[in-house]
Image: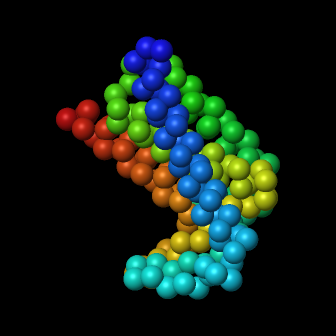
Amino acid sequence: MNNKIKTKLYFLLLSIFIVLIDQFTKYLIFYKKKLFINKDFLLFKLDFVANYGAAFNILSGSRILLSFISIFFSILLIYLIFRKNPLNSFDLYSYSFILGGTIGNGIDRIYRGFVVDFINLNIINFPVFNIADISINIGFIFLLYNIFKNNR
């Protein structure tokens, strides 16, 4: 196997790892609520919220539309990771983090009909979120950094 394929497989495996962590944490919150809900940590507490929309609950109740959007962007991101044009590592990390989060939340939407959110910040009033949301945001931060770095 050549180096380019190994590198691209590494980034796909990173996405799969993110999906596994996301789904495991959601499983714990969903099926073991009594053990984890209302546990207070320094910066956050664990809650259970069924989010029927996208970020900040936009498009609430649009399960089919949001499921198709998840599938479409997952396919697009896999294409971007595996396309022949060479990408820099920052782009590949960006796409991998966004892909992992998109698939994680997409699984919830398709399987449960809603996304399991459970991280509730104590320090600011912010919507409840999950590992997939964190991953998507990390990916977007990497993308923005790379865009601004390359436009200097």
Q: Can you see residue 56?
A: no
User: Residue 108's x, y, as percent?
Assistant: 71, 55
Nearer to us in this view, 55 or 32? 32
Q: For the point 65% across and 68% down, which residue is it? A: 28
Name the image colouring: rainbow
Which of the 4 image quadrants contains residue 149?
top left
Please tell me whether residue 85 is drawn above or below residue 61 in the rendered image: above
Nearer to us in this view, 92 or 67? 92
Q: For the point 50% across and 50% down, which residue is it? A: 136
User: Residue 96's x, y, as percent?
Assistant: 48, 39
Farthest residue in the left direction? 152
Placement of the C terminus among the 4 image quadrants: top left
Please tell me whether residue 10 is drawn above or below residue 103 in the rendered image: above
Give left or right: position of 69 versus 144.
Answer: right
Which of the 4 image quadrants contains residue 148?
top left
Please tell me whether residue 89 is drawn above or below residue 25 in the rendered image: above
Give left or right: position of 62 versus 134.
Answer: right
Which of the 4 image quadrants contains residue 24?
bottom right
